[in-house]
Image: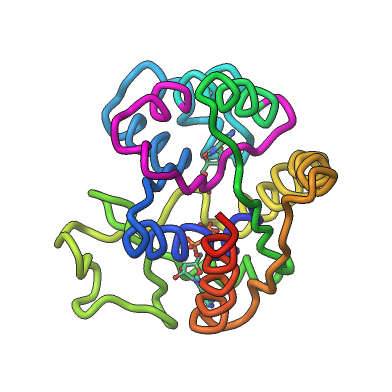
Amino acid sequence: MGPPGAGKGTQAGRIAAERGLAHIATGDMLRAAVRDGTPLGLEAKAVMARGDLVSDDLIIAMFRERLGADDTSAGVLLDGFPRTEAQAGALDDMLLGLDRSIAAVVVFDIDEETVVRRLSGRRMCRANDHVYHVESNPPAVEGVCDIDGSELYQRDDDQPDVIRTRFRKQWIEAAAPVIEYYRGRGLVSNLDAAQSREQVSAELDELLDGLGARA
Ligand code: ADP
Ligand code: AMP
């Protein structure tokens, strides 16, 4: 968990690939739905563009279907879900039914000005949401994804005013009770996400290795 721009997707993509976990990013799934023009995408598009949360009902149904896919059996890394108390409750019910549990909740701590700076320079690829930054992590060829060759673009919601709305509504307001809920269950580890990619990676790897050792 963490505010937009904290580096969740950057780390989750790397870790999922390295550890053979399924990376479930609800934001990526929604952008694919918008791209494909599905009913879900049509409903979510304007909500996302103004920085609000998509309705719990839609998100929970989309997530439930994804969690049922075959590639989730070895473990799942959740990125951007759950974001509300209703979503956290629905996740608990789903996990109970599957006889599975949450191993850890990592909270990425970072201040608003740093995320505004990061997201103003973020570029994503059209095909697979691979993440770049114009200054700190540019692609080899400007405007082209190193990994799949698709076009890089700037998200509609990565404009300073929308970034600030997302930070306030989605992080400060909606996420706080979810974090407290998990903290009460002893699941939360906080991480200083304003550090360099290398430092964040090292801390996260140590944390995950520790979980592996306990499993
Ligand atoms: P989130 O998934 O939390 O919204 P991203 O992983 O997309 O965040 O990262 C947001 C932006 O910040 C991207 O442009 C990414 O390249 C950049 N970024 C990610 N981690 C770091 C870091 N530790 N230091 C500086 N920039 C970073
Ligand atoms: P992200 O890619 O995680 O920054 O998400 C992009 C946008 O998708 C968010 O600003 C929300 O509008 C929407 N979204 C993603 N995940 C969720 C979720 N779990 N609940 C509600 N809305 C979501």
Where residue 135 appears, as percent x and y from the top left, is: 42, 82
Left or right, 162 with respect to 186, comes to: left
| Farthest left residue in view | 149
Write the residue at 70% across / 53% down: 167
Q: Is residue 51 above or below residue 200?
A: above
Q: Looking at this rendering, what residue extends furthest in the front direction?
A: 214
Residue 13 appears left or right of 198? left
Looking at the image, which residue is at 76% across and 44% down? 182
Whether 198 is drawn above or below 61: the answer is: below
Asked if residue 144 shows in the view, the reply is: no
Give residue 11's position: percent from left, percent from top. 47, 65
Looking at the image, what colour scheme do you see? rainbow
Q: In this orientation, does residue 150 appear?
A: yes
Q: Quadrant of residue 170?
A: top right
Magenta stretch in the rendered image: 63-86
Q: In x, y percent, where is residue 148?
A: 16, 60
Quadrant of the rendered structure where residue 20 is? bottom left
Q: Residue at x 39, y 28 (%)?
A: 66
**Residue 81 is inside the magenta segment:** yes
**Residue 64: within the magenta?**
yes
How many numbered markers are drawn?
Answer: 0
Quadrant, the C terminus? bottom right
Q: Nearer the viewer, residue 47 or 58?
A: 58
On screen, residue 42 above or below 139: above
Residue 3, horizontal then vertical, whole percent: 65, 55
Residue at 74% over, 30% down = 85
- Seen from the viewer's position, the closer of residues 32 and 62 is 62
